[in-house]
Amino acid sequence: MILFLKKAVRKFSYAFAGLLDGIHNDASIRLQFVLGVCTLLAGLLLHLSLIEWSIVLILVALVIAMEYINSAIETLTDVLFPNYDRRAKKIKDYSAAAVLVVSIVALLFGIIIFGGRLWIILM
Ligand SMILES: Nc1ncnc2c1ncn2[C@@H]1O[C@H](COP(=O)(O)OP(=O)(O)OP(=O)(O)O)[C@@H](O)[C@H]1O
């Protein structure tokens, strides 16, 4: 049991180190964190409902997680293909497209949720 807990703590510390490394060394990840924090602050200001908070939190986490996966794939691709290679281009472009899809959905939900709240306040 203690061995299992030690292993779990070690795994968590690796994941946490990855989290911090991304924030320190990857501009795209940092940007997503900044946008995420701004979104959460806007949510606090606009007093979102429970269901709105649930959607916002899921989407903020999803976009940030996708950015981490995209960066990991980019790093791996750079190792596997140090020179120009059309397979590397495909891998990186598909990976970036995945982030784009989630980001567009998050943006649309943001417009609906935050736009709706502003509409209620301003009317
Ligand atoms: N080895 C390669 N072979 C072919 N095309 C590549 C290669 N590396 C990058 N590319 C192309 O250049 C684009 C940008 O790649 P890059 O590695 O600069 O990623 P990025 O999107 O700028 O991310 P970041 O700035 O976070 O590194 C890729 O989406 C891909 O189209």
Image (cartoon, helix red, strand yellow):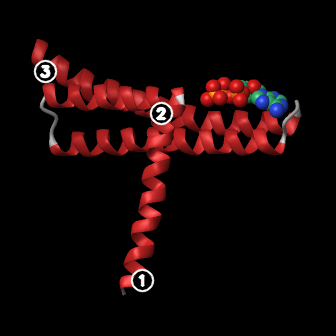
Q: Residue 30: image x %, image y %?
A: 45, 29
- Residue 10: % across, % down: 45, 66
For ligand 1, tell me if the residue under mark 2 lies within 8 Å.
no
Identity of the residue drawn at 48% across and 57% down: 14
Q: Which quarter shows the C terminus?
A: top left
Question: Of the residues under marks 3 and 2, which one precedes in the sequence?
Answer: 2
Residue 29: give its label.
Answer: none
Q: Which residue is mark 1?
A: 3
Give amino acid for label 2.
His
Gap between marks 1 and 2 measured at Cα: 32 Å
Name which residue lies at 46% across and 50% down.
Answer: 17
Which quarter of the image is occupied by the N terminus?
bottom left
How far across and down, in percent of the image, does residue 6 sit? 40, 75
**Disc 3 designates what residue?**
120
Please say if 5 is above or below 40: below
Relative horizontal placement of residue 4, taking residue 119 as reference (left or right) = right
Mark number for residue 24?
A: 2
Question: In terms of image quarters, where does ligand 1 lie?
Answer: top right
Amino acid type at image mark 3: Ile
CB of mark 3 within 8 Å of CB of mark 2? no
- For image coordinates 21% across by 45% down, the residue present is 51
Mark 1 and mark 2 residues within 8 Å of each other at the beta carbon: no
Q: Residues within 10 Å of mark 3 (few under 14, many from 20)?
A: few
Q: Position of residue 61 (x, y in %)?
A: 39, 43
Q: Nearest the camera: 106 or 27?
A: 27
Classify mark 2: helix, strand or loop: helix
Residue 75, placed above or below residue 28: below
Judge from the rendering whether residue 42 lies leftward or rightward of residue 1; answer left or right. Answer: left
Q: Secondary structure at mark 3?
A: helix
Mark 1 vs mark 2: which is more N-terminal? 1
The disc, 3 or 1, on the residue closer to the chain's N-terminal end is 1
